[in-house]
Amino acid sequence: MLKNIKFISNFFCNFAEKYMNRTKKILIAVIFIASIGFLFWGINFLKGLKVFSDNTVVYVDYDEAYGLTSNSTVLLNGITIGRVNNIDFIPNSYRVRVELLIDNEYKISKDSKAIISSNGLLEGKIINIVPGNSSEYIKDKDFLIGEVNPSMTDVISAELLPIRDKIMSLVSSIDSVVNIIQNIANPEMQKNLALTVENIKNTTINLNRSMAHIESISQNIQENNMKITNIIDNISEISDTIKNSDLHLVINNLNKDILELQKIIDSVNAQTGTLGKIIYNDSLYNYLNQSSLNLSLLLEDLRKNPKRYINLSLISFGSSAKETKNK
């Protein structure tokens, strides 16, 4: 800034040298320099800083700047005692080192804390100095303990964030409701909606009927509760009887009979034994078939020539009678 002021001053001096006399040149230069100084003093005065006082340089390390800027105010019990002069990264680290200019008029203990706080909703961040208990005071190039205080604004913002999300969700829901209302305004949608309402009405009627049937069934069950109880008791007695009986012996005997039957079936399938031969050998079938045919011929001959067989019988009977008399 001093270089800029000197450049502007030289410019005005050269200008005055060409167009004005020496006294006017000096007067203009003095007025210009005084104006610049007064402007610089006025800006710092509005910030609450003392321009012509000595300052102590103090450093504070933070994880991040948290919205601090150069010329941010440093307060002690609400009184401005300095400002932030510079913010830079710590070498070989992503942490931030903040350089503070503290007025020498204020004595601050070495174990004091420099806490970053919010200075209101519309203002930026400030640094509040919380005094410690040490009897030693900070010197030039000393370090203070850096902390961050969650301001009321940050707390309110954190509390309002879920509300904001809910409001956004509510807005989306309102948009959906508006779209649904617009669709309902469609004549075809109204027709479908009327059909849906009619179906719901019919379903309700059927449901009422079903409930009446269910109530009737429930009443019947309640009226026959004693009978149902007796049936359950009888089933329980039967179950106990089966449990106490020698059912396993019956099952074992049944298994033995099944095994014997399986042996017989295997013997028949192996074509061994009489039954197997009868089933798989057709000689018996042929013999029975031939015998049936001969019997049929005999019966047919008996039907056609009965005398042949009757005479023989009578002769036999007569001869038997004669033999009896002779005896």
Image (cartoon, rainbow, N blue to C red):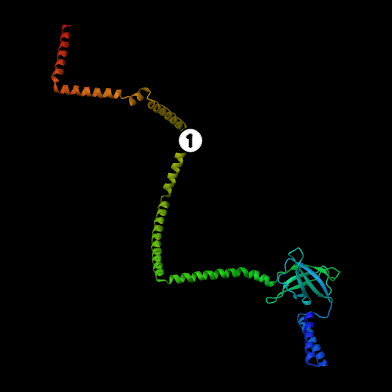
Q: Which residue is mark 1?
A: 244
- Residue 40 at x, y = what percent? 78, 82
Residue at horizontal 40 percent and vertical 60 percent from the top? 207
For the residue pair 22 and 188, the one nearer the viewer reads as: 22
Viewport quadrant of the N terminus: bottom right
Residue at horizontal 81 percent and vertical 74 percent from the top? 102
Q: Is residue 106 left or right of residue 298?
A: right
- Dot 1 alpha-carbon crowd within 10 angstroms: few under 14, some 14 to 19, many 20 or more: few
For the residue pair 163 and 224, the one nearer the viewer reads as: 163
Instruction: Tell which residue pokes out farthest to the top in this image.
Output: 327
Quarter of the image holding residue 203?
A: bottom left
Secondary structure of the residue carrying tag 1 is helix
Q: Is residue 77 above or below residue 28?
A: above
Viewport quadrant of the C terminus: top left
- Residue 11 at x, y = what percent? 77, 85
Q: Is residue 66 above or below residue 37?
A: above
